[in-house]
Amino acid sequence: MKISDKYSILCDSDFDNIKKVLETKKFSGTSEIVKKYEKKLASFFGSKYATATSSGTTAIQTALFIAGVSSGDEVIITSTCPSMSVFPIIFAGAKPVFCDTEVDNFGLKIDDIEKSISTRTKVIIEVPMWGYPTDVKKLSDFAKSKKLPLILDLAQAHGTKLNEKYLSSYGDISCFSTHDRKIIATGEGGFILTDNKEYHERTVSFIQFGNMNGIDFGLNYKLGALQAGLGMSRIDYVKEQLEKRNKNAKYIVNNIKNNFVEEFKIIDRGNPNYYSLLLMLTSSNNLRIIKLLDERGVPSDVVRYNYKLLYEYPIFKRFKKICVNSEKLVKNITTIPVHPALSGEELEYIVDQINNIK
């Protein structure tokens, strides 16, 4: 059996929403449906302002711009994040400064941030991986004490909570992707959440060519109306999707009997969205286990994306800074799909394959 790690949602209201957009004959990013989508996003996440963007990457690039990041600046971030989180920093002419994670989660280690802050540090970016929460409350308090904006890259964390609040509640600027594989999926797309009016106004200006006023700089990073129509539909299914993912994840975790496999630690008062189920491995050869499961049809992002610390890839080698906790963390994890399309038979197969590893 081969388990698919891809999940493409199709909602009952998709066709009606797309038909309504088509009937308006207005498909650009300035269409009224985009504004309605943004209001619905803001309402769902409890944010004052939401702005739809053409991708999660353009959301990050926009966030860096509105936070004032430019050539020669430094941005603190973990090396455990995906390359898409760091490319916008380099594109802005800034330097990514890799900091270590906590011992048992993907949150930035504050002691290491403290040592890494310089006069050129402009922002801090936190990237919770695979939808598992990090202590963004503690990080937010620290960032405020240093008068540094906190950007949260929540591309994989739609619906993830800490203290019963969405993680975006703790960021000065929160960036999301709505790519096909995400929990809110519009094909391609993204959005930015903030409670800061000035940040919001700068965001709207930047993604629309600086409002074309001949004064302000900007690019065209707007989301199209058809994608916004899909987003309008799919926001309504987020909670149902989270429930199914949680149920599937718990089934697998509760039935694991292999003593060197357990779920990744969830921080106190944290609720993952189970974008994927994260497992901790404590065998003498974790990579062998990950590859063996993959060969047996249980896919892992570690294999699919050749996942490792960013500074181990040639393109980021010049930014290398040894992160001891991160290196250990990455060697001990794997991912398992738990999306809503999995059948009971497939879930049983996943459990059997994990339990049969020797």
Image (tube, rainbow, N blue to C red):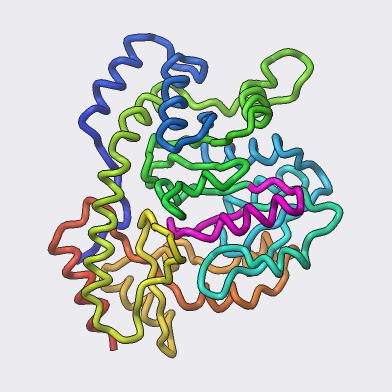
Tell me where the magenta segment starts and ends, as one range.
126-150
In the displayed structure, does residue 306 sit left or right of residue 247?
right
Quarter of the view holding residue 252: bottom left
115 shown above or below 70: below
- Give the residue drawn at x 45%, y 65%: 268
Query: At which x and y percent is residue 228?
Result: 41, 26
State the residue lying farthest toward the top: 24
- Give the residue drawn at x 54%, y 60%: 135
- Give the residue drawn at x 43%, y 32%: 41
- Give the residue drawn at x 77%, y 53%: 74
Q: Quadrant of the N terminus?
A: bottom left
In the displayed structure, does residue 50 sit left or right of residue 289?
right
202 shown above or below 332: above
Towards the viewer: 215 or 42: 42
Quarter of the view holding residue 187: top left
State the residue lying farthest toward the left: 345
Quarter of the view holding residue 100: bottom right
Query: At which x and y percent is residue 203?
Result: 63, 29
Q: Quadrant of the C terminus?
A: bottom left
All told, the count of numbered labels is: 0
| Residue 135 lies in the magenta stretch | yes
Query: At which x and y percent is residue 248?
Result: 24, 60
In the displayed structure, does residue 328 sit left or right of residue 109?
left
22 shown above or below 109: above
Towards the viewer: 327 or 290: 327
| Residue 114 lies in the magenta stretch | no
Query: At which x and y percent is residue 192?
Result: 55, 36
